[in-house]
């Protein structure tokens, strides 16, 4: 049960109605790998950071059991930096700065002993890079990619090439509609299946997520919280929980895919309760299972006839 | 187990991307009472229609076991008429015409033997009328009202007076935020509880609904359909299913409130599959229970530890 994680590592400056954090640990691969580390021991990280990346944060990743052999450290450029400001309603945000820095040169070469990873989670990066990574691998059992409107608009042909190589894609609702050119999400999903992935996770932000395959549907709400401190990384945390559970159990039956979505939602709900990565830096199994049970209470009902 | 239903009866002209229906049966009280008739025998309807209301539709309501003694038929004015056109995405609509007609004079006098109704469901009408109705009643066990932005903006003081007299309110998410002047739905709900209702159903359209009290939370997705033919009346159908189940079981424990929300969602999902009231005119118990089971499959997951 090995999980290969590829994506960005960043130092983010984040402003929400509840406060501000400067040059704090961020990036898709950071959230995915940290989250997955609660599920399996063999998480393999591939990414790039810059001269200013704190060695204490590399030590943090190692302390979670994450294999950082694939983490390149640029000797001349700084770490990817994003500065965002969330609106009062937290559903929208403005980007103040995006400095790619070292990430601009990200051209991942997968370490030889990572090639045979069973499970692969590719964060939201250029689909050309996603494809290049997948082609380096030796028959992975299950590949998931994340993508976004930026690539659908700017790299559609490349994205479609990459989609042919993956089992599952994570996408948000408006992006699924854009990609399929279809307003109904169920119909949109069926169109996307024809492009390659056999399964989709459609993220709906504060409204939760939907898992859809040709055979079944499953929905999960976002956990209703009085205070969402910082939604940054929620989608990546979700993906990390999902892939962590799948890699741990090696089971993609419908019943187990549902559990993977639930664990993804559990982890995401814990992440947004604090700034940056702080919500998932140090979790106990008890805390995770408490939130799991809260999700059951939130969604389960008795069986009773009319 | 009697349920008193007060609201509008209308003849609607509806255009959706899938077709058009002219002067077809509509109105909040129509949807609520028809839906509730699948749950209990004693549904009591109070409303007003005009000279053009088809006698066949009154016979239809009677055929569902609905007591129409409280249905006034104007001798001079036509029936309330609404003409709406839904956008391609079905989440938005334009109103072409609203002709109040007989409904303008709606000043309900509750028939004497309806005064002791146990359960009361007040459709989305002027809160002054809702209050007047409630004050005519003899200690009902449970009163639910629906409301909307139009009354929050135009009749806020009256709405707040009415809210003091009710157990539960149905409201959509943007209206709850408007009423509470608060963006977070959980915090907004807590503010609304201080205005009177002990329970809220927050409707989120295609994203489902949330039941919230001071003690617990429950969420239910909207049933994912490939074709939503006509969303008109979905919220009223939801309310009718909810109150029908509550009136049938006379039980407002958390576990049973959850079931009421589920039955509301089941009925609403069946309603939107056809035009106007057609989706709920003639349902079998088997069909209702099939959809109930589909909701379980859509939301339930195993209990398993990390």
Image: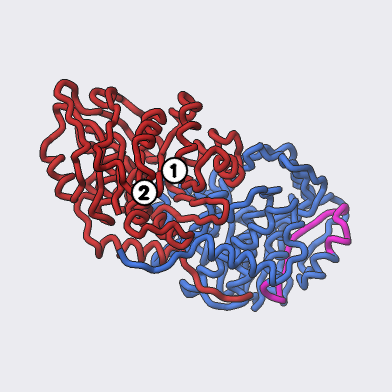
Chain colours: A blue, B red
Looking at the image, which residue is at 82% across and 70% down? A63
Residue A3 visible to the viewer: yes
Q: CA distance from mark 2 to mark 1?
A: 10 Å
Return the residue at label 1: B170
Q: Which residue is mark 2?
A: B238
Query: Is the residue A31 above or below the residue B158 in the image?
Result: below
Q: Chain of mark 1?
A: B
Label 1 CA crowd tier, 10 Å (few <14, some 14–19, many 20+) = many
x and y percentages locating residue A69 in the rendered image:
79, 70
Is any part of residue B99 visible from this angle?
A: no
- Chain of the residue under label 2: B
Residue B67 coordinates in the image, percent (x, y): 20, 45
Q: Which residues are the magenta region?
A: A39-58
User: Picture coordinates of residue A41 (x, y %)?
Assistant: 72, 76
Image side of residue B185 versus residue B8, left or right: right
The number of numbered discs placed on residues in the rendered structure image is 2
Quadrant of the frame with the C terminus of chain B: bottom right
- Compared with A251, A283 (above or below) is above
């Amino acid at each position: 049960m090995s999980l290969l994680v590829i994506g960005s590592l960043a130092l983010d400056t984040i402003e929400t109605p509840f406060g501000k954090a400067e040059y704090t640990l961020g990036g898709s691969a950071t959230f995915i790998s940290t989250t997955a580390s609660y599920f399996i021991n063999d998480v393999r990280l591939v990414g790039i950071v810059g001269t200013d990346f704190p060695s204490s944060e590399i030590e943090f990743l190692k302390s979670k059991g994450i294999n950082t052999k694939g983490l390149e450290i640029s000797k001349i450029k700084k770490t990817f930096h994003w500065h965002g400001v969330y609106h009062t309603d937290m559903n929208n945000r403005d980007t103040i700065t995006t400095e790619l820095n070292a990430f601009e040169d990200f051209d991942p070469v997968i370490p030889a002993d990572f090639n045979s990873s069973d499970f692969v989670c590719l964060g939201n990066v250029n689909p050309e890079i996603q494809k290049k990574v997948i082609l380096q691998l030796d028959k992975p059992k299950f590949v998931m990619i994340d993508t976004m409107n930026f690539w659908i608009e700017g790299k559609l042909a490349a994205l479609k090439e990459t989609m042919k190589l993956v089992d599952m894609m994570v996408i948000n609702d408006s992006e699924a509609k854009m990609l399929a050119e279809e307003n109904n999400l169920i119909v949109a999903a069926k169109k996307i299946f024809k492009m390659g992935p056999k399964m989709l996770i459609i993220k709906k932000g504060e409204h939760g997520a939907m898992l859809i395959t040709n055979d079944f549907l499953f929905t999960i709400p976002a956990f209703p919280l009085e205070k969402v401190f910082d939604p940054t990384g929620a989608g990546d945390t979700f993906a990390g929980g999902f892939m962590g559970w799948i890699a741990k159990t090696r089971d993609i039956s419908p019943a187990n895919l549902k559990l993977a979505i639930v664990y993804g939602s559990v982890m995401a709900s814990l992440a947004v309760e604090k700034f940056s990565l702080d919500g998932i830096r140090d979790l106990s199994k008890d805390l995770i299972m408490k939130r799991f049970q809260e999700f059951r209470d939130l969604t389960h009902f008795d069986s009773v006839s009319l």
